[in-house]
Amino acid sequence: LRFERGEADPAVLAQLMQEDVEEITKQALENFAAEEQVGLLEDAVFVLAAVSGIDVALKAMHNAGQGPVRRSGVKALFEFCQLIQISPELAQRTGEAVVAMVQESQEDPSLSQNAELLKGLCEAEIRRQVHGHGVT
């Protein structure tokens, strides 16, 4: 997938949706939930967010429970959210979901670190859009 800031090729997304990529990526997350397949998990969450939306990716991460899917997924969402513009409402929901994941996995420093990055990005997006401030 090739993304420019704020847009993806609609033809590519339509083709992926026809091929049921959402179900394939969800299945990959379930099958490898307990494994440290960082690249595969990151890619699966990134594609799921691109094809089905951030809320769907967050739900899949929540359903996976504590562990590698959340750790890799939060990193993938951080990378994905850098490429698109998300609404303040979605940024708020994303930040809240990530905080909840960290609270459930307080012993996971990698998740905490990735979550801080994503939460900071979401907060900056909210400030930029709601308050009209640029990110510094």
Image (cartoon, rainbow, N blue to C red):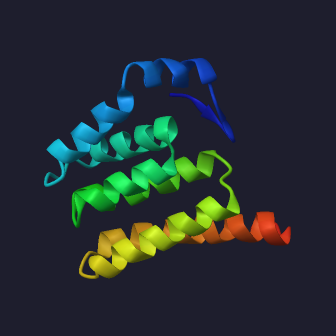
| Residue at 32% in and 61% down | 62
| Residue at 31% in and 33% down | 23
Q: Nearer the viewer, residue 117 or 132?
A: 132
Name the side, left or right, on which 41 lies relative to 16. Answer: left
**Compared with residue 48, is residue 54 higher up or lower down, i.e. above or below?**
below
The image quarter in which residue 136 lies:
bottom right
**Compared with residue 117, is residue 48 higher up or lower down, i.e. above or below?**
above
Name the spot of residue 54 as percent of width and height, x first. Answer: 50, 50
Name the spot of residue 47 as percent of width and height, x first. Answer: 43, 37
Task: Answer yes or no: is residue 67 visible.
Answer: yes
| Residue at 41% in and 56% down | 58
The image quarter in which residue 17 lies:
top left
Name the spot of residue 42 as percent of width and height, x first. Answer: 35, 47
Name the side, left or right, on which 128 lies relative to 72. Answer: right
Name the spot of residue 1 as percent of width and height, x first. Answer: 50, 28
Q: Nearer the viewer, residue 78 or 103?
A: 103
Name the side, left or right, on which 44 lies relative to 16. Answer: left
Q: Nearer the viewer, residue 72 or 58?
A: 58
Q: How many numbered tags mark residues here?
A: 0
The image quarter in which residue 72 lies:
bottom left
| Residue at 45% in and 23% down | 16
